[in-house]
Image: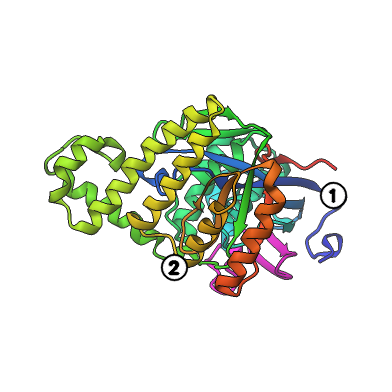
Amino acid sequence: MTDASSPGQNSEAARRVFVRAPARVNLIGEHTDYNMGFCLPVALQHEIVASGSRRDDDRVTVYAQNFDETVSFAAGAIRYDAEHRWANYVKGVVYFLAERGLPLTGMNIHISGDIPAGAGLSSSAALEVATALLFEHICGFTLAPVETAKLCQRAENEFVGMRCGLMDQFACCLGRKGHALFLDCRSEEYEYVPLDDRIKIVVCNTGIGRELAGSRYNTRRSECEEAVRILKKVVPGIQSIRDIDYSDFKELEDLLPPTLGKRCEHVISENLRVVESADALREADYERLGKLLIDSHRSLRDKFEVSCRELDVMVEAALSVEGVLGAKMTGAGFGGCTVNLVDERVLGEFERTVIREYLGATGIRPEVHICESADGAGIKNG
């Protein structure tokens, strides 16, 4: 698509704005964000890049380079698009920007990126945040990063239909290079915790994707909400699973159906692991952190039941390599990626072993990404 020749483009065609929004990987704290708990994500160098220029009408025309598809819609008449589902992440953001009464104009938008879709690295959040930033810079209004994150989360919850928590959009907006982000999803307080360059974060893509809005993710959230509803009858003050101590839960566990009990036990223990993991990072105790990641994967597999054979095979292959401190699934589950803490001295052996073992067990050649931390979303330079 050549933006300058698009209908409705005015004389400002040369005044293009470029923005970037990063992927994120969650070290630990899966399915805790919508339970008002803790998580520990890292923004990554993989990113969505979006450029845009103002039009003289109210149409928003979006070209997605990775799909080679164009979608066009009027900013005042936005409808869900069942054919081009990627476009709903853009449409949802524009819808809620308009609902706030912000001064929007039509726009020509070009989107590209290197975040694998459906891999659990939050390509959707990056697309949402990049869209919001484009409109902010081109239309001349300002949103604080936390406001942007919340608006984009709302777009995903209410327009797309994916009932995610705040972590993905928060990490995309507020990540910092060289640091993990320790986030309290209830208070929205956060802390930057330094990372050690000698320990590498490696993301391995199983090649098993999932359509989150139609997956068991929303079912898991509903199960957590049902557990809280039951427990409120005997503990009236609780608002989320986060409010239940582990010792209290063991006394209340028999009040819950076995499945809901397992869901609660994962969330409660995972919150404890996140807090301990942040402490381990502060102390540069990567062996301790690695063990917590392994425990997290076992809980996600056995208690929250969001792993799958491919994720488990990938984790076991990683842990067979000496110098790998920890490995676990990351993201919503049901496919996607694992996150691994790897001593930089064994990166080559790690990659060879994971590819060989996973390919042999599944017939799928995995992608292995040695990741670098990155800053949160902003203007793209260069």
Which is more toward the observer, 180 or 183? 180
Alpha carbon separation for disc pair 2 and 1: 41 Å
Q: Which quarter of the rendered picture does the C terminus lie within?
A: top right
Q: How many marks?
A: 2
> Where residue 230 sits in the image (x, y, percent)?
17, 49
Q: Quadrant of residue 149?
A: top right
- Determine whether the residue tagged by mark 1 lies in a helix, strand or loop: loop
Quick check: can you spot residue 266?
Answer: yes
**Is residue 287 in the magenta section?**
no
Up-down relation of residue 380 to residue 57 (above or below): above
The residue at the point 57 percent across, 48 percent down is 340
> Where residue 63 sits in the image (x, y, percent)?
73, 64
**Residue picked out by circle 2:** 214
Q: Which quarter of the rendered picture does the N terminus lie within?
A: bottom right
**Residue picked out by circle 1:** 12
The residue at the point 50 percent across, 48 percent down is 153
Q: Residues within 10 Å of mark 2 (few under 14, many from 20)?
A: few
- Decide if residue 215 is on the left or right side of residue 368: left
Q: Which residues are magenta?
A: 59-87
Which is more toward the observer, 103 or 301? 301
The answer to which of marks 2 and 1 sits earlier in the sequence is 1
Callout 2 amino acid = Gly
> Where residue 84 sits in the image (x, y, percent)?
60, 70
- Determine whether the residue tagged by mark 2 lies in a helix, strand or loop: helix
